[in-house]
Image: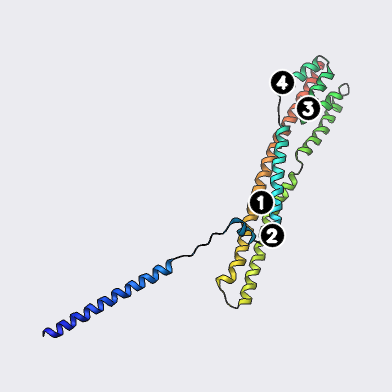
Amino acid sequence: MHIPLLVLARIQDLTLGGATVTDEGTSGAMATSAEVVTRDVSIFELLLSGGWYIMLPLAIMSFFALFIFFERSMAIRKAAKEDKDFMAKLKDYLSAGNLDSAQNLCEQSGTPIARMLHKGIARIGKPLKDISTSIENVGKLEIYNLEKNLSTLATIAGAAPMIGFLGTVIGMVNVFLDMESAGMVRVDDISSGTKQAMITTIVGLIVGIIAYMAYNHLVSRVSKVIHMMEASSLEFIDILEEPAR
C-alpha cells in the first residue's frame, strides 16, 4: 500500500516540475517575441522617401511662399506707417496756401497715402472731380504695388495640396505594381509606396495650409491700408472744399 502511494507522489512531482519548465520556456519565448526593434529615421530621409519629383516642387513652393510672405509683410508694414500729425500739418499748409511745403511734407513721408495726396496737391486749381480722379488713379497703382505677388501666394496655397495628392496617387500605383510583381502581399512589398503616398500628402497639405494662412493674413493687412488711403483721400477733399463752404 505504501509503494504505490510513493510512486504516485513521485509522478506528481515530475509532472509539476515539467509544467514549471514549460511555463518558463513559454514566458521566455513571449518575452523574446515582445521585443520590438526600433530604427531612428531622420526627417531628411523621411522626406526623400516621398520621391524627389514630388518633394522638389513642394520645397521650391514653400521657399517662394516664405519669401513672398516676409517681403510683403515688410512692404505693407512700411505702407501702413502712420504719422498722426501728417494730416494736421497738411491742412495747415493748405489753409495757408503753402503748396510747396505741403508737397515737401508728402515727399518726406514716402507712404502710399502721401504719394496719393501729393498728386492731388499738384492738381489744386482744377475742378475737384479732376483732383479726385487723379488721387484715385494713384491709389489704384499703390494698391497694385501692395498686392504684388499675392496671387502667386494664393496659387501656391491651392497647388501644393494637389501636388501632394499627385504623389499619393503615384505612391498607390507603385504599391499595386509591387504587389503584382511579388505575386503575394507582404508588408515589405507595399511599405515603400504607402510611405511615399502618406508623406507627399502630409507635406503638400502643410505647405498649402501655411501659404493659405499667409495669404489671408496679408490680404487683411492690405485691406487696412486701403481703408486708411480712402479715409485720407476723403479728408483731403474735405480740406479743399472748406474754403467754398
The disc, 4 or 3, on the residue closer to the chain's N-terminal end is: 4
Residue bearing the label numbered 2: 54
Q: Which mark is residue 85?
A: 4
Which quadrant of the rendered structure holds the C terminus?
top right
In the rendered image, the residue lying farthest to the right is 126
Q: Are marks 4 and 3 in contact (CB under 8 Å)?
A: no
Q: As shown in the figure, which amino acid type bears the numbered disc 2? A: Ile
Closer to the observer: label 2 or label 3? Answer: 2
Q: Position of residue 180 (x, y in %)?
A: 63, 76
Mark 1 secondary-structure assignment: helix
Asked whether 16 or 93 is in front, the reply is 16
Scheme of image coloration? rainbow
Q: Position of residue 33 (x, y in %)?
A: 43, 69
* Residue visible at 64% across and 60% down in the picture: 48
Residue 99 screen position, x and y as percent: 84, 19
Q: Quadrant of residue 225?
A: top right
How far is mark 2 from mark 4, CA to CA? 53 Å
Disc 4 versus disc 1: distance between alpha carbons? 42 Å
Crowd around label 4: few <14 · some 14–19 · many ≥20 (10 Å): few
Q: Earlier in the sequence, mark 2 or mark 4?
A: 2
Residue at image point 86% right, 22% down: 124
